[in-house]
Amino acid sequence: MTDREFSTLPGPVRAELTRLRAEREVYTAERERLRNELAEAEAKLAEATAERDELAETLDGERSEEHLASLTRRAEEAEAEARERAAEAEAQRQETIAARAERDTLRAELAAARGERDRLRLTLLDAELSLAGQPMPVRRAPGGPESDERAAQLAAEVAELSNELEATRSTISWRVTAPLRAVRKRTAR
């Protein structure tokens, strides 16, 4: 999204997008940290396992058994730490998925809001044209024959109302009271 597009968004949507971006950066940094810690734990586990295997082959007696037990404990601790890091990474992934779903929902709402805004702008333009005495352009709403009938009805109503307005403006009383309306408009300012 460009800065220009971003600046045209409503304030609450911009704030929410900024918040989501910040959360995404935090989640990404945390995920990388957890991946690094997981890699370190796996490396320690591999090292401890290699030491244990090496000592099991070369040493014998009580000392080797104690050392082997110590290495086994260290390997088990490393495995537990690796499982814990993997669980944290999975939780982080789930949070990222939820944030992306929320972002997609907000994008859909934004698109709907833009469509509504454009529809209202066209309606306002039609009303301004009608007030200015210009014929309204006929806009076809998607939908089929029912919408065509409705559009025809609305066009007929607009034409009828425009004719009534023109007839009212051409009456003698309307022309006689025109100076009074002009004075009222000036005094209202």
Image (cartoon, helix red, strand yellow):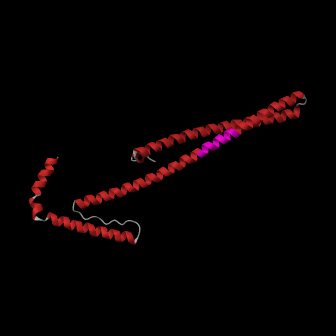
In which quarter of the view is residue 53 placed? top right
Most distant residue in the top direction = 63
Side (left or right) of 116 relative to 44:
left
Q: Residue at x 41, y 70 (%)?
A: 144
The magenta-colored residue range is: 83-94
Identity of the residue drawn at 89% across and 28% down? 62
Percent of width and height locating residue 78: 74, 35
Q: Nearer the viewer, residue 102 or 135?
A: 102
For residue 138, side relative to residue 17 (left or right): left
**Residue 49 counted in the magenta span:** no
Q: Position of residue 39 (x, y in %)?
A: 69, 38
| Residue 21 percent across, percent down from the top left | 50, 42
- Comparing 35 with 90, the one in front is 90
Across and down, in percent, residue 181 comes to 13, 54
In this picture, is 96 found above or below 152? above
Which is the main secondary structure of the residues drawn in magenta?
Answer: helix
Image quarter of residue 170: bottom left
Magenta-drawn stretch contains 89: yes
Residue in the foreground of this view, choosing between 102 and 67 = 102
Horizontal side of 41 relative to 17 (left or right) equals right
Q: Farthest residue in the front direction?
A: 173
Instruction: Determine the residue positioned at 45% across, 52% down.
Output: 109
Q: Is residue 154 above or below residue 67?
A: below
- Residue at 25% over, 68% down: 159
In the rendered image, the vertical position of residue 92 relative to residue 156, given as above or below: above
